[in-house]
Amino acid sequence: MKSRNARLIVGLGLLLIGTSAQALMSTDELLSICESGLQNPVRDNPKYAFCTGAMLGILTTDVIEKDLICVPSQVDTQSAMRLFVQRAKRKPHKDIDGFITMHRALLEAYPCKKK
């Protein structure tokens, strides 16, 4: 079973390498979704849920991989989303993936202190 999963992962990786370097979702697209989600910030709103999930995914991956982002406990989801929206409008980086822009927004606002 492990070798089958490993082959699947390697195959998906090769597929991704073989595709052109194109953003999964542009900064403008993610910005539009998150702005719309913030207009009705409830769990049942798919756009709010999507943006929240993207942000939690970025933060979870950061904790597992590098531990570069340290969001203070008093910062709520809507505040973090507004931070991304402001960053995306100020420095949109239209040539890169929206999720990278979201990561940069969190990293710039909440960097961990070097030990």
Image (tube, grey):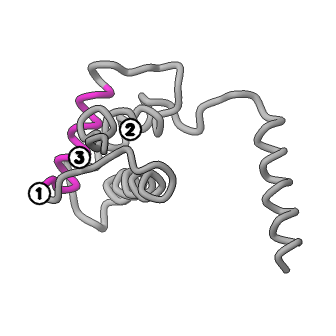
Judged from the image, the secondary structure of the residue bearing numbered disc 1 is loop
Which of the marked residues, 1 or 2, is nearer the chain's N terminus?
1
- Residue that label 2 marks: 102
Q: Give the spatial CA distance, label 3 vs label 2.
A: 10 Å
Residue drawn where x is 37% and y is 43% of the image = 33
Kindly identify the residue that appears in the image at 30 percent across and 45 percent down: 115
**In the rendered image, the vertical position of residue 18 relative to residue 68, given as above or below:** above
Query: Looking at the image, which residue is at 44% across and 56% down?
Result: 57
Q: Amino acid at mark 3?
A: Ala
Magenta stretch encompasses residue 115? no
Earlier-in-chain disc, 1 versus 3: 1
Residue flagged by tag 2: what amino acid is it? Met
Please give the label number shown on residue 45. none
Of labels 3 and 2, earlier in sequence is 3
* Left or right, residue 19 beside residue 61: right
The residue that disc 1 covers is 74
Q: Which residue is mark 3?
A: 80
Q: Residue at the spot x=34%, y=56% of the render?
A: 52
Image position of 91 with respect to 17: above or below = above
Spot occupied by residue 77 in the image (x, y as percentages of width and height): 22, 55
Please report the bounds of the magenta region as a residue range.
74-88
The percent position of residue 50, horizontal first and vertical second, equals 40, 55
Q: Secondary structure at mark 2?
A: helix
The Cα atoms of the two marked residues, 1 and 3, are separated by 11 Å
For mark 2, does the 10 Å Cα neighbourhood hold few (<14), some (14 to 19), or many (20 or more) residues?
many
| View extreme (front): residue | 115
Q: Residues within 10 Å of mark 1 (few under 14, many from 20)?
A: few
Query: Which is more foreground, mark 1 or mark 3?
Result: 1
Using the rendered view, name the quadrant where residue 110 is placed: top left
